[in-house]
Structure formats: C-alpha cells, structure tokens
Image (cartoon, rainbow, N blue to C red):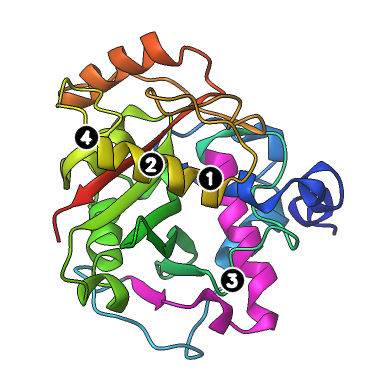
Amino acid sequence: MINRLSVASGGRAARRDLAEFEGILSFKPSDGRLYSLHCRVGVLAMAFKLDGRYPTIASPWGDYAVYSFPDASKIGCSDRQPIMDAMNSIIAINWKAIEPHWTASSSPFDSKYSLILVYDRVELIAFSVYRVMTIAHRMAIYRSGTEVLPAYQGRGLYGFFTSQILKHPCAASHSERLLYGWRTRNPIVWAANAKICEMVAPSLLADEADADLQAACIEMCATLYPGKPLEVPGMIMRGAYGHIEHIRQDYRGTASLVEAAMSRIIPNSADALFSVGYARV
C-alpha cells in the first residue's frame, strides 16, 4: 500500500521553500478527510515507536514516553520517514490540509531544529519543533510547530513543551532577556505564548509598543522567511497558511479578546501574525 503523505511530497510540497513550513501551531481538529487519514497506512505511521533506541526524559505522565532532541539531526535516518509521516498525520487531523507539511526537502531533521516527541503506548500523540537562534545580538527561540492529537488536548502537553524548550542549554545559560518568537493565526496559541512573555510585538491587547521588540520581530521574520513580506507594525504575514486552513471555534477568556483583534486585523484564514516577546525564563 502506498503512503499518500509520502507520495504527495514529490509535487508542490517538495518545491515549496523550507521557510514556508515554519510556524505550525494548532489545537482544533478538522475531519481529516483531505488526507484520508483513517486508512490503515495512516494508523501504522502514527503507531511507529522508538522503543529502546533513544533515551527518554522525565514527564508528569508515567504512561507516556517523551523524547527530546536538542539537535534533531541526531535522529537516525531509518526512523525519520515514519516519524515525519506520523507528524503529518497529526497535522492533517488538526487542520484542513491539502498536502504534507513536513517533507524530505523541508525536513524537521535538519540540525538547526530541535524536536520533542511524545508517545503513548500505541502511537505518536504530540510533537514540538523549535529553533534556537541569535537575533538582535540576543539568544532567541522560535516555535516552529506544535501539534497534539485531539484526544490528548487539554492535558498540559503544550505547557510541558514550553517548559522543556525554555530549558534548552543555550536558552537556560543565557543571562539577558530571551527573545521568544512564534507565528500563528490561532488565538489560543497566541494567548498561551504571550502569557509567558513580559511584552510582545505586535501588542494585540493594548500593551505599550516596544521599538526593540518590533525590530527583533522584523529581523527574526526576515531570517526565517527570507523574501516573505511582513506588514509593519501589525506584523502580518499574508498567505502564510496557503496549504492548510485554521478552523475557527468558540473562544473564552483572553483567547476571545485575541480572536476579536485577529478578526479585525487578519480576517483571511490564510494570514498569520508573526510575534516576538521577552520570555520569562
């Protein structure tokens, strides 16, 4: 049987610039029918496990196996395609997707990426991809993509990923304020990341604008997405999600305020906000 997620990478996905694959963050499931994910191949891909081949790290869940790779290129070549297929399967469940997000030519196993994988006793249930960089002469972290299977959402996995990312050796040893960046059009994700920051650009919730943060935002975006326009001061990236579609839902609390702001600023579901803040480490 042929894995559709792998085969599709030979078309438009294989030709897409690697930079366009940064910044997937979502928590709302779609029906997943665009990828026919409930076929046997999709289930087998997600059920691929790493038992005994890599050390695990401690987590609050005794029945989960958590693997942390500060350098994602350390993952063995024979493990990469099954892991990538499982990652794409989760993305296609959470988004309306028309093609694979991660491919051989746009791989999460490049040495510039760090990767955290979470498995239950059956399958990959969540992952987070991030990068450690230097922006504006400061240490910076960029959240390249985080996904959690719908059945496991609301269990603290996103917060766990954040805490582990902020423990990265390069970030933990840095004395200056840490720059923390992400791109999203999901109000829940924007609110969750802004919550751990002292200040954020763009300042959606009426915080005072910070010129240094705005400059860092522009520099980080240009580094990650060379040639891609960023509208300033709103920090809007038009058409960022052309190959996937965010699904709006009912929001509460801070997320509802963020959603109201996003609806005014970026009503098109393909657009995204690029944001940078000072993380509280």
Q: Which residue does the image show at 15% across and 26% down from the upper left?
A: 207
Q: Which dot, 3 or 1, sits closer to the camera?
A: 1
* Residue 154 visible in rendering: no
Asked whether 272 or 76 is in front, the reply is 272
Residue that badge 2 annotates: 217
Percent coordinates x, y for residue 4 in the rendering: 79, 50
Left or right: where does residue 160 sit relative to residue 227?
A: left
123 drawn magenta: no
Percent coordinates x, y for residue 211 in the rendering: 26, 35
Question: Alpha-carbon distance for marks 4 and 2?
Answer: 11 Å
Of the numbered discs 3 and 1, the one sitting upstream in the chain is 3
Question: Alpha-carbon distance for marks 3 and 2?
Answer: 37 Å
Of the numbered discs 4 and 2, the one sitting upstream in the chain is 4
Residue that badge 1 annotates: 222
Q: Is residue 159 above or below residue 111?
A: above
Local SS, label 2: helix
Local SS, label 1: helix
Question: Alpha-carbon distance for marks 1 and 4?
Answer: 19 Å
Local SS, label 4: loop
Give the residues in magenta: 64-93
Residue that badge 3 annotates: 48
Residue that badge 4 annotates: 210
72 drawn magenta: yes
Of the numbered discs 1 and 4, the one sitting upstream in the chain is 4
